[in-house]
Amino acid sequence: MANEIENPCDTDGVAHTFDLVLERVIDAPPEKVFKAYTDPAILSQWFAPKPWTISDAVVEPRAGGRFNFTMHGPDGECFPNAGIFLEVVPNRRLISTDALTPDWRPAGAPFMVARIELEPTGDGKTIYKATASHWNEESMKQHEAMGFHEGWGQVADQLGELVKTL
């Protein structure tokens, strides 16, 4: 019917498949990788692709806990990032989103849900899988064009180097 109003609550409950995925093997156990994610001082050393940096990191690794930081570019760019953790399984999984505030209220237009999965390999290493799940194809393509694979790949490499020193 041409005059029907589209109902935004009329969903099929099926997960969207607008994912970008990065996987690496990191030469450190999951406990060290998890620590690098959840300690703000350590996170600040590797979480932005160089020459970018981050400051003001707040990491509260629990469901509803804040995951905030400000990203700084080499030409004075400044991008605050605010989000929360949806799930934290120590040494195995961190899921966060920019879609909600710590009091579970909508935080403007959501961009993604980030899922970090850490799987021990049995020989002291970690299979590190980072998935950025988007609400629609447009956001996914925007993230890809922003340099998801290059940027998240560089950050994963920086993480891999840093955890060797922990």
Image (cartoon, rainbow, N blue to C red):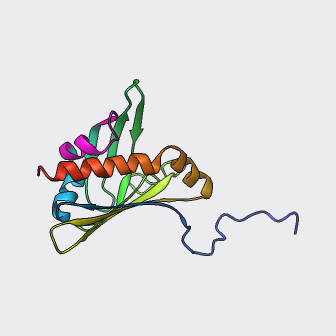
Q: Nearer the viewer, residue 107 or 28?
A: 28
Quadrant containing the N terminus in the rendered view = bottom right
Q: Quarter of the image holding residue 120?
A: bottom left
Vertical order, 2 against 48 (above or below): below
Percent of width and height locating residue 164? 14, 53
Percent of width and height locating residue 86? 37, 62
Q: Quarter of the image holding residue 30?
A: bottom left
Q: Quarter of the image holding residue 33?
A: bottom left
Vertical order, 127 against 148 (above or below): below
| Residue 63 in view here | yes
Q: Nearer the viewer, residue 101 or 137?
A: 137
| Residue 67 in view here | no
* Residue at point 51%, 51% (across, down): 111
Q: What is the span of residues highlighted in magenta in the rendered image? A: 41-54
Q: Nearer the viewer, residue 17 or 55?
A: 17
Label count reads 0
Q: Nearer the viewer, residue 35 or 69?
A: 35
Please say whether residue 48 is one of the residues in the magenta stretch.
yes
Which residue is outermost to the right? 2
Percent of width and height locating residue 52? 34, 34
Vertical order, 144 against 26 (above or below): above
Which residue is outermost to the left? 166
Please say whether residue 38 is one of the residues in the magenta stretch.
no
Say whether residue 149 is left or right of residue 46.
Answer: right
* Residue at point 42%, 47% (across, down): 150
Say whether residue 32 is left or right of residue 77.
Answer: left
* Residue at point 30%, 55% (across, down): 65
Percent of width and height locating residue 11? 63, 71
* Residue at point 58%, 52% (across, down): 141
